[in-house]
Amino acid sequence: MYKEILRTMNTEAFMASLALIVFFVFFLLVIIEAWRKSPEEIDELGQLPLDEDDEVLFSGLNPSTQSRP
């Protein structure tokens, strides 16, 4: 029975359906993870791009802190 289903199945349609299911499950997991975060954690994560502490962590990668020859 399974061999008959696999033999008659259109491969492109199966791959498209599988991709849709995988992306939908991933999207749901991201939504659930975002929903479970506390408001304080969301505010902390929202302030990360604005923090000035990244110069200490990435001093070797920040071109503005490197001396120019």
Image (cartoon, grey):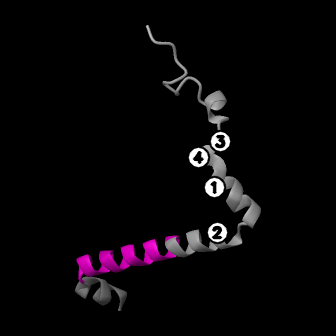
- Extreme residue toward the top, this view: 69
| Residue ID at (23%, 82%) | 10
Labelled disc at residue 31? none
The quarter holding residue 33 reads bottom right
The residue beneath circle 1 is 46
Give SS at disc 4.
helix
**SS for callout 1:** helix
Provide the residue designation for mark 3: 51
Residue 33's tag is 2
The secondary structure type at the circle numbered 2 is helix
Of the residues shown, which amino acid type is indicated by label 1? Gly
Q: Earlier in the sequence, mark 2 or mark 1?
A: 2
Spatial CA span between label 2 and label 3 = 24 Å
| Residue that numbered label 4 is attached to | 49
Asked if disc 3 and disc 1 are in contact, CB closer than 8 Å, the reply is no
**Gap between marks 3 and 1 measured at Cα:** 10 Å
Q: Residues within 10 Å of mark 1 (few under 14, many from 20)?
A: few
